[in-house]
Image (spheres, rainbow, N blue to C red):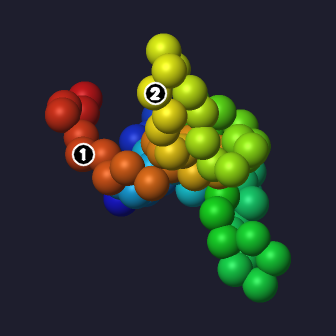
Amino acid sequence: MVEIENDWLKVTIKNDGAEVCKVQHKENGLNYMWTGDSAYWGRVSPVLFPIVGRLKGDRYMVEGQTYHMSQHGFLRDVRFSVASQT
């Protein structure tokens, strides 16, 4: 997890998918994000790239070559690391 903050907000970001999972007001403690309750939907704000939705057969074609791509693309399942933080 990565945390960034200013005078008003504290933001928590997961390394998996670079998903913003918490945006909390520092004064009143209010969290502006969905909590990710797995009973309903376990994610909070996944990064959907390069598509939103599902391709027919989970496949696409570029210049005659067929490729596989899962629902909502691949970025939400990539593990990210912080290169620098200030």
What SS does tag 2 mark?
strand
- List the residue tagged with mark 1: 81
Q: Which mark is residue 65?
A: 2
Q: Nearer the viewer, residue 86 or 39?
A: 39
Residue 43 placement, left or right of 1: right
- Examine the rendering and report whether any part of residue 2 can be seen: no
Question: How many numbered marks does the figure carry?
Answer: 2
Residue 72 is situated, as x and y percent measured from the top left of the image, at: 64, 45
Q: Nearer the viewer, residue 13 or 48?
A: 48
Q: Eyeballing the image, is 20 above or below 30?
A: above
Q: Are marks 2 and 1 in contact (CB under 8 Å)?
A: no
Quadrant housing the N terminus: bottom left
Residue 21 placement, left or right of 17: right
User: What residue is shown at x 37% (from left), y 50% (from top)?
Assistant: 78
User: What residue is shown at x 24% (from left), y 33% (from top)?
Assistant: 85
First along the sequence among labels 2 and 1: 2
Residue 75 placement, left or right of 49: left
Residue 71 is situated, as x and y percent measured from the top left of the image, at: 65, 51
Give the class, few, some or many, for how many residues have Cα within 10 Å of label 2's Cα (few <14, many ≥20): few
User: What residue is shown at x 50% (from left), y 21% (from top)?
Assistant: 64
Q: Eyeballing the image, is 42 above or below 29?
A: below
What SS does tag 1 mark?
loop
Looking at this view, name the residue that lies furthest to the top.
63
Quadrant housing the C terminus: top left
Q: Eyeballing the image, is 31 above or below 59?
A: below
Residue 26 is situated, as x and y percent measured from the top left of the image, at: 59, 51
